[in-house]
């Protein structure tokens, strides 16, 4: 047997009860454990250690349990709120996209009509319209970026900041 076979067997023994292994790896492992006393002893020792650890009762104080339940409920509420906000933002984005496409089409048609009426180069009016049309979107994007939680990590309403405060 090579060292790599022993290493592979030990790794599979460690992983099989936690993450699970494929049926091919399980067959190889059983075959290897039947023929290798060293790896078989490792597997038996690990099983005994697991059995010993499972036989020790672990209890948590009531205050820890209630605090954990409270935190889990708060986090679940935050996730529900986040999901709702994400859905509403998605709807707003779709409506904004439709409105933008429609208004751009109409606005460019009107700008070409206006260029014909006042005898100015159409590209000049179209450029002015595009700049005028994009200005609100750019201003809103800058405002949102300025107030994003990552731009101000000291904000206490951000869940990670609250979690760090609780740890300290």
Image: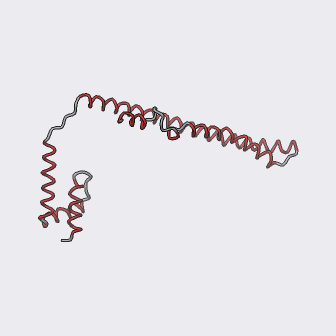
Q: Which quarter of the figure has residue 10?
A: bottom left
Image x and y of residue 148, in percent: 53, 38
Q: In which quarter of the image is the N terminus?
A: bottom left
Image x and y of residue 23, in percent: 24, 59
Q: Residue at the spot x=85%, y=45% of the render?
A: 116
View extreme (front): residue: 168
Image x and y of residue 85, in percent: 49, 34
Relative side of 168 to 154, left or right: left
Q: In this view, does 74 lie above or below 53?
A: above
Image x and y of residue 110, in percent: 78, 41
Q: Residue at the spot x=13%, y=55% of the render?
A: 45
Q: Quadrant of the C terminus?
A: top left
View extreme (bottom): residue: 1
Relative side of 141 to 156, left or right: right
Q: Which quarter of the figure has residue 55?
A: top left
The residue lying toward the viewer, choosing from 126 and 108, is: 126
Q: In this view, does 8 lie above or below 88?
A: below
The residue lying toward the viewer, choosing from 123 and 146, is: 146
View extreme (right): residue: 119
Q: Residue at the spot x=83%, y=44% of the render?
A: 115
């Amino acid at each position: 047997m090579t060292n790599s076979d022993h290493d592979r067997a030990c790794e599979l023994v460690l992983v099989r009860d936690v993450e699970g292994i494929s049926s091919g790896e399980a067959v190889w492992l059983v075959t290897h454990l039947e023929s290798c006393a060293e790896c078989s002893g490792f597997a038996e020792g690990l099983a005994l250690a697991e059995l010993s650890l499972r036989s020790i009762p672990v209890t948590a104080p009531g205050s820890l349990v209630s605090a954990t339940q409270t935190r889990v409920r708060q986090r679940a509420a935050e996730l529900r709120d986040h999901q709702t906000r994400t859905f509403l933002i998605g709807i707003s984005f779709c409506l904004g996209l439709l409105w933008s496409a429609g208004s751009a089409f109409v606005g460019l048609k009107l700008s070409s009509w206006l260029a014909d009426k006042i005898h100015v180069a159409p590209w000049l009016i179209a450029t002015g319209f595009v700049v005028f049309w994009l200005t609100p979107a750019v201003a809103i994007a800058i405002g949102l970026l300025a107030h994003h939680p990552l731009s101000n990590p000291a904000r206490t309403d951000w869940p990670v900041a609250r979690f760090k405060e609780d740890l300290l």
